[in-house]
Image (cartoon, rainbow, N blue to C red):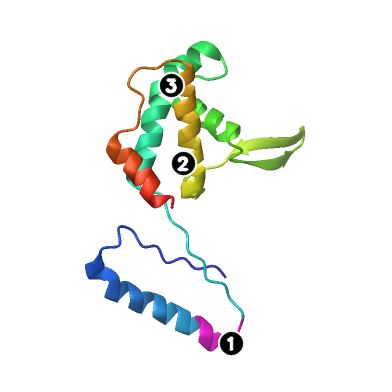
Amino acid sequence: MKETIEFIDCHKNNWGDLQVQVSSKLCGFLKLGKSFKVSFEQSKTPKQLKAYWRLVGLITPYMIETYKGQINNTEDTSNFVKMQCGFYKEVKAKSGPMLIPKSLRIANIEELKEMIEKLLFICRFFDIPNYELTKEEERDLNNRAT
C-alpha cells in the first residue's frame, strides 16, 4: 500500500495543520506494527512546468524543420527531449521492446530540471532568440531543486 500526502506551497500559517495530518498518518502506520518507509520529495510547480512548455514551444518550429516528418508538434518535441534525457519506459510489443516517453506528471524535480537544461541546450544550438529563463523561473527551479 502506498499513500502520498502532498504539500503544495506550504506557508508557515498552515504548518500546524500539516503537522497534525502527517502525525496522524504516521501514528496509524505505527499502530499496525508493520514495517513502512517514509520519504520526502520535492514536487514540481506549475511555474516550472510552464517554463518547460514555453521552451518546448520555442524550439518546436526548429525541430519540425530539422526532423521533417518525425516531429510535427510540441508533443513530439517534448517526447524527443524526454527520450534524450532517458525519461522513458520499455514496453514489450509483438515487434519487440519499445521505448515510450513517460508522462511529465511522474517526473520529479531533478528530472524536470534535466529536461529544461536539455531544452536550453537545444535553444542555444539553434541560436533561438529570447529563450533564457526569466529570473523568476530560474529562482523557482534552483530553490526547489536543493
In this view, the residue in front, 144 or 58, is: 144
Q: Residue at x 59, y 33 (%)?
A: 83
Q: Secondary structure at mark 3?
A: helix
Q: Which residues are magenta?
A: 29-34
- Crowding at label 2, few (<14), some or many (≥20) Cα neighbours within 10 Å? many
The one nearer the camera, 129 or 18, is: 129
> Magenta segment: does it hold 11?
no
Q: Which amino acid type is shown beneath numbered disc 2? A: Lys
Residue, x 29% and y 75% (percent of image)? 17
Q: Is residue 63 above or below residue 144?
A: above
Q: Which residue is mark 3?
A: 59
Q: CA distance from mark 1 to mark 3?
A: 53 Å
Q: In this figure, which residue is indicated by the disc labeled 1?
A: 33
Q: Main secondary structure of the magenta part?
A: helix
Could you tell me how far apart the alpha carbons at marks 2 and 3 are, in whole angstroms? Answer: 17 Å
Q: CA distance from mark 1 to mark 2?
A: 38 Å
**Residue at x 42%, y 66% (from the top left corner):** 5
Task: Name, please, the residue furthest toward the left.
Answer: 13
- Per the image, the residue denoted by label 2 is 113
Say left or right for 145 vs 111. Answer: left
> Quarter of the image containing the N terminus?
bottom right
